[in-house]
Amino acid sequence: MKQSFEIIDNVYTEAVKGLISDESILHDFDKWNTYYLDLPRKEQLTYSICLLDWQVKNGGFHQYFFNSYGIFCFYTVENLREIKCDAHADLLYQAISIIYDHKEQQQDFQRRLFHRKVEAISDFKEIIIEKFEPLEEEYYRIEESEEIHNKLGNYLIR
């Protein structure tokens, strides 16, 4: 397990080098999205999955979306499936479905998240936070075994 954490940390560090050297990227949706899409595949996976995991464990799905990391939510669902974390992917998809009208274009939704224009999130609507709670409880239950770190680490060493 220690090896998994070291590998993940090394790949994550590589993924964020450009953001550390140019923080302005984080303040522009198009630049940040392009930065992410231009990362090598393993760095994309690591970056998006680590952001989700840290945010949910620290403050739940609301925090993940509120802090704009939710702009990567659709990619993250795919990335979780790729490393065989299907239960996590299902939970994230359910969380997305609480606040996302599937008639809306995904990129429009991502932009609204970035600019904090998703009212259910930016207005801290209690009903939304309550809907996230059972998903977060299940996420925490699954993560007692640190499944994400194990599966991500195993994926990265392939």
Image (spheres, rainbow, N blue to C red):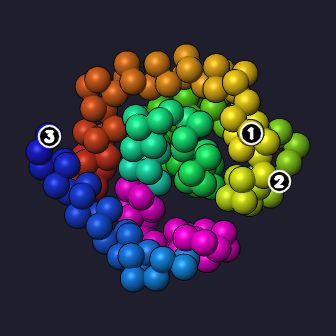
Quadrant of the frame with the C terminus:
bottom left
The residue shown at (54%, 41%) is: 63
Residue on which the image places disc 2: 105
Quadrant of the frame with the N terminus:
top left
Residue on which the image places disc 3: 1
Residue 5, numbered circle: none
User: Cα distance, mark 1 to mark 3?
Assistant: 39 Å
Taking the image as shown, residue 23 lies to the left or right of residue 114, namely: left
Dot 3: what SS?
loop
Taking the image as shown, residue 110 lies to the left or right of residue 90, namely: right
Q: What residue occupies the far right of the structure in this picture? A: 103
Q: Amino acid at mark 2?
A: Gln
Taking the image as shown, residue 20 lies to the left or right of residue 105, namely: left
Residue on which the image places disc 1: 123
User: Cα distance, mark 2 to mark 1?
Assistant: 22 Å
Dot 1: what SS?
loop
The residue shown at (70%, 24%) is: 126
